[in-house]
Image: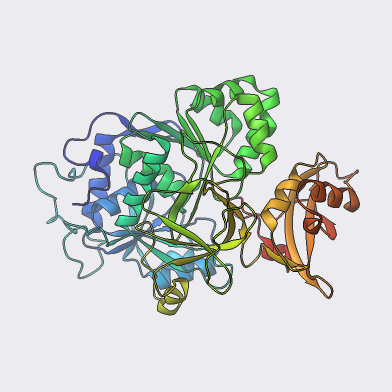
Amino acid sequence: MSSLFPNLTGAPGDRVALRFGERSLTYAELAAAAGAVGERIGGARRVAVWATPSVETAVAVVGVLLAGAAAVPLNPKSGEKELGHIVSDSAPSLVLAAAGDRLPGALAGLARIDVDPAARGPVPGAPGGSGADDVDPVRAAGNPAPVAEADDEDPALVVYTSGTTGPPKGAVLPRRALAHTLDALADAWQWTGSDVLVHGLPLFHVHGLVLGVLGPLRRGGSVRHLGRFSPEGVAREVGDGATMLFGVPTMYHRLAEALPGDPALAGALGRARLLVSGSAALPVHDHERIAAATGRRVIERYGMTETLMNTAVRADGEVRPGTVGLPLPGVELRLVEEDGSPVAAHDGESVGEIQVRGPNLFTEYLNRPEATAAAFTADGWFRTGDMAVREPDGSVRIVGRKATDLIKSGGYKIGAGEIENALLEHPGVREAAVTGEPDADLGERIVAWIVPADAQDPPGADALADHVAARLAPHKRPRTVRYLDALPRNDMGKIMKRALTA
């Protein structure tokens, strides 16, 4: 049996493992409920999970992993076409869901098992056997008994990418990658079994599922899921003894907005051991507002679906807004030019594409050998497509995506991210995005997309250009400014720039 969750095998204790609203499970209850899932899925090798923010999703994924199978988390907000592609591509034997969940037509061809958090199956590693002879009637025909052992290289999750350049690709994450990332973060963040994590992240993605649920379970700690994120929920849970908060920039922006009028929230966040933001860059303005109100700085980390976590600011390290820390133990990271040659300078200015190598990487894109081969260099470095600079101490600062955020203007390589941060420091700007568009003279010109703080009195284009030039450099000022009521964002809060430029 895999040792991904040593606290769920043998003799699990009565410490609370999961809490979703009023519903909670101890380690002993979770182990038994997950054991029941393992019994019912039989020898299925790949199992879809309808990944709502619920205790059933956590039980389902843990049960699949303890049984040695791979889970395919499904985003409940995905459309029929996307879900149909994922099901066809991943070919799961069945789908796990909470009783009462209505599943879309795209899943109609899959056998369904309702997850019961109160069910009691065999606890992995406990005396009494695995229960492998009790085969559920909904098991796919011909499935053997449950898998008793799982190798470190065996698939744990198949997580589908956002599909911005075509149909979503299934990144196959081995058990080794999960264990390595979670242990490396434990080292960086001094994460132990005494920590209680709070978050309101979706559970179909790496951030909320791997870091936010599997992370506490691997450590032997607790996770409290908010269901739906709110500053009030954060204040309640962190004020009730939680030690860590995970969120995305949109969530921290809402906290920063709420803090001036909510002393209880400020006090709770000030007592938290660790505030962590990820999935996109947290604007400097929000960093500073949270620090001023709480005395606590938000730390950032950098990862992707295909790589899990690559870098992190350490709990005992220096927090500098805009940086995502040093490479985690065991992770190699380098910046390269367009021709593949290394960017040697750690000067905070030289931009290159991030490439990484290490035990945190995925093994393949499911059924996509050509895409898998194209994602790696000949010597095994993964091409992230993210652009960054490195500070003199080696810390990484992300400046954007190669495909959408690298702007070549007037002979300079410019990252959109740093311009966006500068724009967000202007008091008249609520939201900002930066893209490039063709220009006969410059090659590309910098375009700023602005949601003004006051729609009736937006800041002028010249004032914004001067504001950026004074903070960064004259060649980084926007040449065109376009005003919007809101920026298009995905479920993780990331700005969908292709929707802007389309």
Q: Compared to 494, does 316 lie above or below?
A: above
Q: Residue at x 35, y 52 (%)?
A: 178
**How is this picture coloured?**
rainbow
Q: Is residue 341 left or right of residue 172?
A: right
Q: Which residue reaches farthest bottom? A: 370
On the image, the x and y values in percent for residue 431 come to 74, 47
Query: 201 or 401: which is nearer to us?
Result: 401
Query: 471 or 312: which is nearer to us?
Result: 471
Q: Is residue 270 left or right of residue 150?
A: right
Q: Is residue 267 left or right of residue 61?
A: right
Q: Residue 476 occupies which quadrant of the picture?
A: bottom right
**Residue 389 seen in render:** yes
Query: 226 or 436: which is nearer to us?
Result: 436
Q: Compared to 178, does 161 lie above or below?
A: below
On the image, the x and y values in percent for residue 271 come to 51, 22
Number of disc labels: 0
Q: Is residue 463 left or right of residue 406?
A: right
Q: Residue at x 54, y 67 (%)?
A: 163
Q: Residue at x 37, y 46 (%)?
A: 184
Q: Residue at x 22, y 51 (%)?
A: 2
On the image, the x and y values in percent for residue 199 come to 49, 38
Q: Residue 444 occupies which quadrant of the picture?
A: bottom right
On the image, the x and y values in percent for residue 103 come to 46, 58
**Residue 225 seen in render:** no
